[in-house]
Image (cartoon, rainbow, N blue to C red):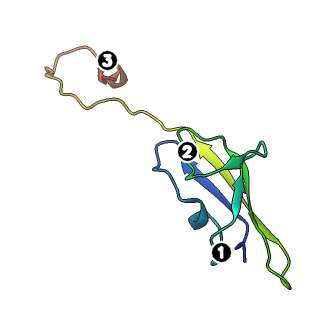
Amino acid sequence: NAGGDSALVLCELDPPLPMLSALAGAPDAGGVWTDPGGAVFTGPFDPADDQPGEYVYFLAGQAPCANDQAVVSFAVSNSVEAGSSGSLLLCGNDDPFQLLDSLAG
């Protein structure tokens, strides 16, 4: 049982994800993963480094059972940076200004 297909959207800052946990159901271990280019992939999927796309898990069947495969489609969202916190000393008669300009980072 190769498990079921799934589609996941991860943030590029998320930790690496073990490949079998990305499949739906209860997949059996012992199969082979391939990446979107068809090369063998040993995982885990690291959203900061690995290519988004379809990763195929192939599990060879033992007679009389047929081979099985499942697909995990990974999408990766870019992280956002809000800047660094800071503090300002203001007077009531100061001119208006853009708060965004006061963020660091």
Question: Dot 1: what SS?
Answer: loop
Quarter-wise, where is residue 23 in the image?
bottom right
- What residue is disc 2 on? 47
Residue 97 marker: 3
Quarter-wise, where is residue 18 in the image?
bottom right
Q: Residues within 10 Å of mark 1 (few under 14, many from 20)?
A: some
Q: Is residue 81 left or right of residue 9?
A: left
- Give the image location of residue 82, x and y in percent: 39, 33
User: Is 49 drawn above or below residue 44 in the view shown?
Assistant: above
**Disc 1/disc 3 C-alpha distance (Å):** 57 Å
Residue 95 marker: none
- Give the image location of residue 75, x and y in percent: 65, 48
Quadrant housing the C terminus: top left
Q: Is residue 80 left or right of residue 97?
A: right
Which kind of residue does numbered mark 2 sit on?
Pro
- What residue is disc 1 on? 27
Q: Nearer the viewer, residue 11 or 47?
A: 47
Q: Residues within 10 Å of mark 3 (few under 14, many from 20)?
A: few
- Give the image location of residue 95, x and y in percent: 25, 14
Which kind of residue does numbered mark 1 sit on?
Pro
User: Is 23 drawn above or below residue 62 in the view shown?
Assistant: above
Which kind of residue does numbered mark 3 sit on?
Phe
In primary-sequence order, the first of circles 1 and 2 is 1
